[in-house]
């Protein structure tokens, strides 16, 4: 049995004993838990009697600093366009974060991501290469 299941069993035991009329101080002492612990799970039970007493995730439900998907798609599309070198302007041009930043600025993309953010987006999509990749020697 894993620790989460053991902890859930303790929580159920505490609530069962409270429903039978035992004082919460005695329950906490018997289960070697704090009053605050008991109050948390008692409140959880009162909100939802069908609860499974599992731990809830503490991760945020949304990330306000996350770039909109439209901006991410624009960065990826520009990288692909620059890599193809299809036009006269892109044939000998750069394809890195600074070049993409300049293009996004020309296109007036909003919100305009920073160069570091563009670099992170490219790295997340495995579109970056370490310095010196493909070289047989450093000099």
Image: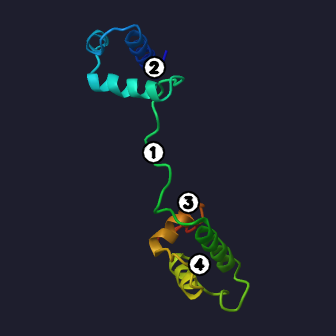
Which mark sits nearer the N-terminus, 4 or 1? 1
Q: From the viewer's side, name the closer residue of 29 and 128.
A: 29
Marks 2, 4: nearer the viewer: 2
- Taking the image as drawn, is residue 128 in sight? no
Which of marks 3 and 1 precedes in the sequence?
1
**Is disc 2 in contact with disc 3, using a CB cutoff of under 8 Å?**
no
Which one is nearer the viewer's eye here, 69 or 89? Answer: 69
| Labels 2 and 3: the sequence-earlier one | 2
**Which residue is identified by label 4?**
95
Q: Return the residue at label 1.
A: 59
- Label 4: how many residues lie within 10 Å, few (<14), some (14-19) or many (20+)? some
In-front residue for pair 75/41: 41
Q: Which residue is mark 3?
A: 124
Image height of 45 relative to 139, above or below: above
Taking the spot 43% from the left edge, 28% from the top edge, the residue there is 44
Q: Is residue 17 above or below residue 83?
A: above
Q: Nearer the viewer, mark 4 or mark 1?
A: 1
CA separation, marks 3 and 4? 16 Å
Q: CA distance from mark 1 to mark 2?
A: 20 Å
Q: Find disc 2 in the rendering and name its residue.
A: 8
Q: Is residue 95 visible?
A: yes
Q: How far apart are the two marked residues, 2 and 4, measured between alpha carbons?
A: 53 Å
Residue lying farthest right? 86
Residue in view at x 73 percent, y 84 percent = 86
SS at circle 1: loop
Separation of marks 2 and 3 at Cα, in angstroms:
37 Å
Compared with residue 62, is residue 24 higher up or lower down, i.e. above or below? above
Q: Earlier in the sequence, mark 1 or mark 2?
A: 2
Kind of element beneath mark 2: helix
Q: Position of residue 75 (x, y in %)?
A: 60, 73
């Amino acid at each position: 049995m894993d620790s989460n299941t053991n902890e859930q069993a303790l929580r159920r035991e505490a609530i069962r004993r409270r429903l039978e009329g035992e004082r919460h101080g005695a329950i906490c002492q018997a289960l070697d838990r704090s009053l605050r612990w008991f109050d948390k799970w008692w409140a959880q039970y009162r909100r939802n009697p069908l609860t499974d007493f599992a731990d809830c995730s503490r991760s945020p439900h949304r990330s306000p600093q996350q770039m909109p998907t439209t901006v991410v798609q624009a960065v990826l599309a520009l990288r692909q366009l620059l890599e193809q070198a299809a036009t006269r302007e892109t044939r000998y041009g750069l394809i890195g974060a600074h070049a993409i930043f300049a293009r996004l600025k020309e296109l007036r993309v909003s919100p305009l991501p920073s160069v570091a953010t563009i670099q992170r987006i490219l790295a997340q999509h495995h579109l970056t290469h370490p310095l010196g990749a493909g070289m047989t020697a450093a000099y």
